[in-house]
Image (cartoon, rainbow, N blue to C red):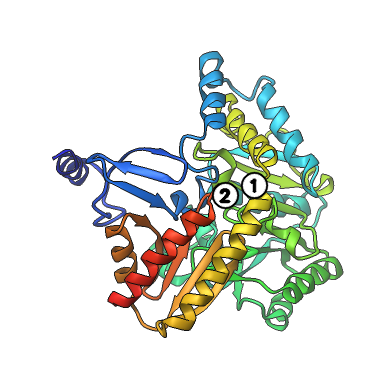
Amino acid sequence: MELEKVVKMDKKYYMNTFGDRTPVCFDYGKGIKLWDANGQKYFDFLGGIAVNILGHAHPALVRAICKQAEKLIHCSSLYYIKTQAKLAKVLAENSCTNRVFFCNSGAEANEGAIKLARLYYRKKGIDNKYEIITLKKSFHGRTMTTLSATGQEKYQKPLTPLTPGFKHVEINNINELENEISENTCAVMLEPIQGESGVNPLSVEFMKGVRRLCDEKDLLLVLDEIQTGIGRTGKLFGYEHFGIEPDIFTLAKALGGGFPIGAVCAKEEAAAAFEPGDHGSTFGGNPLACAAALSVMETIEKEELLANCTKMGEYFFEKLEGLKDKHSLIGEIRGKGLMIGIELNEERAATVKDKCLKQGYLVGSVGTGIIRMLPPLIVTKKNIDGMIDVLDAALVAC
């Protein structure tokens, strides 16, 4: 009855941007588990789309949010903010960058990175360098500019004309990318693993080739770590798998463990392009959001969750390969750590997802042929075994 009330209210008052949603309304969660309004239990292998990195209601995160909320939720960045300064220090000291700017979402972080890349050359008196090369099948956000950076026509076509200044090339094709570099190019912007389009990893060779071209052609390398950052791949940041360093990278999703926060991280030379008045955010870097993110960073280290991500990721991939040997419906299995895409040889992704849901397991689907899994870093072998059994049964039923 509660679900029916929520659905009716939603359909009357909420803008219809999500279509017919999955008919579940969650009431509370703990760890990897969620319970709906009817008391039905679910295992969350989607993690709020790579957001709930510590699972649900992690005690450390809850304590940090409650403690900060009792003291100070928001104040303007016109004043110094202790948790903001501390979080900037933690991110800088644990990455290849030196400076951080905080905002509220991944799209805002990518907007900030795009502005910073263009301003970097404008401040040097090189006004013609403004174009940014991104990849086809990429996803960088839903604002007009990050949508323009996104290499997927299905998102762009209804909203033309787009923000000018973006080119899109094929993933892992270094020759095509090099051919698109012109006197107007200021940066290359990449996801270490494309998430929204089906978990498509960049190759080490490609990433190193892009870094080399950026050095040779005087371009900035911007990495969109919205989904790969904060431990998702078994490293704190995705770029660590490639033996290269970006000039700028962006964070959001997992950074706040469920509380909205985004970040633009940059090396000193690039960061210096932002001067007073060039950028800002009313809510970005507020005391509560930064307290939540500090708790996430501390918990990942204290509970050794990067090691657990690597170990559980390897176990998960091993189990999935076993299913692949059993089911001809499974094609390629892609990803890193606990960022996993399962390509199906037929357009059955929605069916598989629905069958898993009926057994109390949440997974995602991309298009018609890819299952996506993004469980929290606290996932255990027992949790994974349960997911494998349910997926096995779902594939049999297909």
- Coordinates of residue 355 in the picture (x, y in percent): 29, 65
Q: Position of residue 138 (x, y in %)?
A: 55, 67
Please name the residue that numbered disc 2 is placed on.
Answer: 377
* Mark 1 residue crowding within 10 angstroms, few (<14) / some (14–19) / many (20+): many
The image shows residue 107 at horizontal and vertical percentages of: 53, 50
- The x and y percentages for residue 220 are 76, 60
Residue 165 in view in this figure:
no
Name the residue rendered at 72%, 29% in the picture: 86
| SS category of the residue bearing label 1 | helix
Where is mark 1, residue-wise? 305
Q: Quadrant of the N terminus?
A: top left
Mark 2 surroundings: few (<14), some (14-19) or many (≥20) residues within 10 A: many
Residues 203 and 395: in front is 395
Drawn side of residue 180 relative to residue 108, left or right: right
Residue that lies at the very extreme toward the right in this rendered image:
216
Identify whether 15 is placed above or below 217: above
Find residue 224 and report its image quarter. Answer: bottom right
Q: Tell me where residue 74 sits by quadrant.
A: top right
* Image-based side of 395 in relation to 314, left or right: left
Q: Please state which amino acid type lies under the numbered disc 1.
A: Leu
Please tell me which residue is depicted at 59% across the width and 24% down the height of the picture. 287
Count all numbered tags in the image, as a single digit.
2
Closer to the chain start, of discs 1 and 2, is: 1
State which quadrant residue 61 falls in.
top right
Q: Which residue shows up at 73% across the image and 52% down it?
A: 248
The amino acid sitting under disc 2 is Leu
